[in-house]
Every structure is written in structure tokens, then in C-alpha cells.
Amino acid sequence: MTPATHDGARADRRAVIGVLGGSGLYDMPGLDRVREHAIATPFGDPSDALIEGWIGQTQLFFLPRHGRGHRFTPSEINYRANLWALKRVGVTDVVSVSAVGSMREAIAPGDLVIVDQFVDRTLTRPRTFFDRGCVAHVAFSDPVSPRVSAALASACVRLGLRHHLGGAYVCIEGPQFSTRAESQTLRGLPDVAVVGMTNLPEARLAREAELPYATLALATDYDCWHDAHDAVTVEQVIAVLRANVANAQRVIAEVARRPPAGPDPAEDALRHAVMTAPALIPAETRARLALFLDRYLPPAPAASGG
């Protein structure tokens, strides 16, 4: 297993791709040297064990965000543990594969969407690693990685898949789907393309973890705003999603063959973000955040003997 590193971004770093998505994504043709890793984190247990595999010379780690067997609601997912675990095993780029409802006529069920913005409508989820005596404010105006998005878009083009570039992903709390009034209200927000339940605070935490992150959204329905279509049902979502999984697997495999490359703003997102004076960060908090902060903070003072 590749260890995490703290030496900053390097142009020659080998890409290691983390994939957050459904429990069946890793069951894909061409995935070799498959093994599982149970990762303990300072933030509790991840959704499941990480599934490691290789496509050619590229290492991948798959993490079923709802757990195998779909055991966790969107609000029950331990997003902090999931992102910490991916960082710990050396992931350099994160692809979020997410089922969504389309908020635009042009995005039909079955289409793929590579979003470039997020709108947060969640209510109850921990959304930062930085608390308990350590405050950080990362930039998040452009929340999606340009290099991961470019790799996803290029893969879709090479595979000839119908896809859309750009647009905002509105993340609702769930687990219920929207009312018609809510759906119409969300459609009125600027640049909204899709609605889902899982990408926040996931994308926020990826930025804090300095992990370039992008979403491959799988449109399963028109939510309930479209008068010409029935209101979304679980059966409809599952039927379209199953058809989309094969395309998502093809995209991931193609990205692995031509992985994201070049610099990315997320790689040093914490460089000027930590507001708390190092000497004032409690030892327990510093230990909990060491995976992120050790590259920036001076060594902690040694404990005095008695």
C-alpha cells in the first residue's frame, strides 16, 4: 500500500486515483491485483474497507460511500473518515461517481455530467476537519479540480459517451427526494444542472485534505419538476443507474489509462489557510490533523520530563 507523503506537490508524482461511489464500481473488467484495506482514522470508521486495484500502471482505491449493501443514508456517511482514509493511502486525485437528478431539459436520464460548482443545501453534516482548537479557512470559490475534470471529459470524448460540461450540483440533505415546490425552487438557482445528496461536504473535505476532486454525475431522472415525466421513483432511479454503472466503469478505466496530470490548486490549499498559531493548537488536535498539517507546521515541542 502506498504511504501518504507530506512533501508537497510534485510534477513527477505518480497519479493514484481514489473513486468514491457505489459498491459495484470496483467490480469492473481489467482491474488487477485487487485487495482490501481496513483503515482506522482519527474521525471514526470509513464507510467500508478500501478496495485497491490496478489498471495498467495506475493504482486505484475504491471506497463505497454508502457501504457495501448500501447501509448508510447520505447524512450517515462519515465523509471525514472517507477522505482521511483516501489521503492516508496516498491518493492524489479523487473521482466522485454520483447518481443525480437532472435539472435541465438537455440533460436526459442516462447522460453524464462533469459539474464545476456546488450549492450546499445540507443541514446536519460535519463539514470540516478543523475544529477543537485549530481553525482553517480554505479557498473554495472554484471547488472542482481542473485536472481531474479535464481527465474525465477527455475520457468521455474518447469513449463517445454523451456528456455535459459544467453546471452546479445542488446537494440536498435527503434521504427523501424533493417536493415539486422544492424542485422548482432549486431549478431557479443560477447555473444549476443536477441535484444530489452526497457531494457535500465531501468536496469541501477533499479541498481541506488537499485532494483534487471532481464529480462524474450520472443523471437518473428529471427529479419531479418535469411535467412530461412521472415523479421520480426508486425503481426508475435504480434501473437507469444500473445502465449507467457500465459507462462509469469505462470512464474510470480510461482515466486510469491516461491519468490526471499537471499542477492543481487543491494541492496546497492549506498553505495559508490555518489561522491558529501553531503553539496554541492542542496536542490532541495536532495529532489528529497531522496527516494534513505536518508539511506546514514546525515540529511540535518535545514533552518535558518529570
Image (cartoon, rainbow, N blue to C red):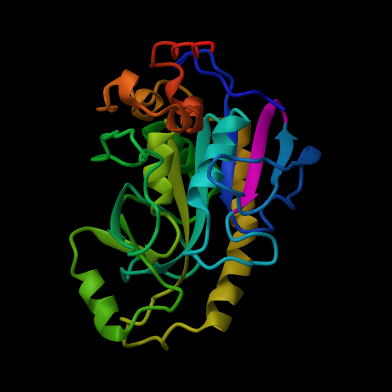
* Figure quadrant of the N terminus: top right
Relative depth, front residue between 79 and 176: 79
Relative depth, front residue between 169 and 278: 278
Residue shown at the point (40%, 86%) measured from the top left: 229
- The reply to whether residue 255 is in sight is no
* Figure quadrant of the C terminus: top right
Residue shown at the point (65%, 39%) measured from the top left: 61
Image coordinates for residue 72, horizontal then vertical, percent: 58, 65
Q: Is residue 238 above or below residue 77?
A: below
Image coordinates for residue 182, horizontal then vertical, percent: 27, 78
- The reply to whether residue 5 is in sight is yes
Image coordinates for residue 23, horizontal then vertical, percent: 67, 58
Residue shown at the point (30%, 85%) measured from the top left: 180
Whether 160 is among the magenta residues is no
Q: Main secondary structure of the magenta part?
A: strand
The answer to which image quadrant residue 196 occupies is bottom left
Relative depth, front residue between 152 and 6: 6
Relative placement, left or right, of 232 versus 28 is: left
Image coordinates for residue 277, horizontal then vertical, percent: 27, 21
Residue shown at the point (51%, 39%) measured from the top left: 94
Relative placement, left or right, of 135 versus 237 is: left
The answer to which image quadrant residue 123 occupies is bottom left
Relative depth, front residue between 196 and 70: 70
Q: Is residue 300 above or below residue 224?
A: above
Q: Is residue 113 above or below residue 259?
A: below
What span is in magenta? 56-64
The answer to which image quadrant residue 17 occupies is top right
Q: How many dots with numbers?
A: 0
